[in-house]
Amino acid sequence: MSCASIVDGQKGEEVEASSSAAQSGTAQQGSTGGQKLAASLSEWIEQRESQGNIAESQKTILDKAKSTGEISTSDYEKAWSDYRQCMIDKGYKEIKLIKYPSGLYVEAGHKQGTTIQESRYSDDSTECGDEYVADVQDVYGIIVGNPNLYADQAQAVVDCLHRDSLVPKDYTVSRFNKEFSGTDGNTSFDMQNLQVRSCLVSNGYNVGYATDDTEQLW
């Protein structure tokens, strides 16, 4: 759940661009030839629920998604509201959310605190996230960013970029992997475009810039 800290930098400086297996730990690296997480969204949610440890309030939302194929805006915003309140109750000054065009929310980054502060924040955000929003966030990310349920994160991102007409039709997964892992930060698409970032974030890629809005935690 915890978001990368924002560091001071020049305008447009990329703060973080990394990949993490956000979708229940099942996303795979590299080419999988179209391998899917599951045959359907309902099946994938069933797999998550079978692993247990999903808070009741989130399970109620996921059970609805199994039958409707969506998470309502009100349910999604309530999950994030509960997370925010949980963190405020733990003593943080504010919790800010960044909203992407797809409706996806992510918590804004923050200025680096002390080692003790960062450790506490990590523990608290994990606790509040597990209780109120983490599983809902993963499923919402799949719905808006990976409706074809591709197991490979990169393939899911490229599919999203194609669906939103953000890259040419001949843009490939191998090209994305090469560009995204490059050290010069150059890509053939605008990494700061909010629709692009929505495709990335919903599929487990954390991308932040020094110009992004930040939250004041302490």
Image (spheres, rainbow, N blue to C red):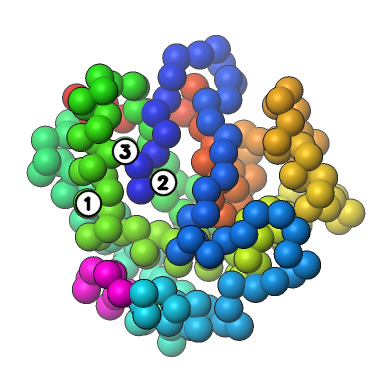
Disc 2 residue type (three-letter): Val
Relative image position of residue 170 (x, y in whole percent): 89, 54
Q: What span is in magenta? A: 52-61
- Residue plotted at (42% across, 50% down): 105
Where 169 falls versus 216 (above or below)?
below
Where 16 falls versus 156 (above or below)?
above
Where 6 falls versus 20 (above or below)?
above
Which mark is first along the chain, 1 or 2? 2
- Residue plotted at (39% across, 39% down): 3
Q: Nearer the viewer, residue 39 or 62?
A: 39
Disc 3 residue type (three-letter): Lys
Which mark is first along the chain, 1 or 3? 3
Q: CA distance from mark 2 to mark 1?
A: 16 Å
Q: Nearer the viewer, mark 2 or mark 1?
A: 1
Disc 1 residue type (three-letter): Glu
Residue 98, by quadrant, is top left
How packed mark 2 is, by other alpha carbons closer than 10 Å (few <14, some 14-19, many 20 or more), is many
Q: CA distance from mark 3 to mark 2?
A: 9 Å
Return the mark for residue 106: 2
Q: Provide the residue designation for mark 1.
A: 127
Relative image position of residue 133 (x, y in whole percent): 31, 59
- Residue plotted at (66% across, 60% down): 152
Identify the element where label 1 is drawn. helix
Image quarter where the C terminus lies is top left
Return the mark for residue 96: 3
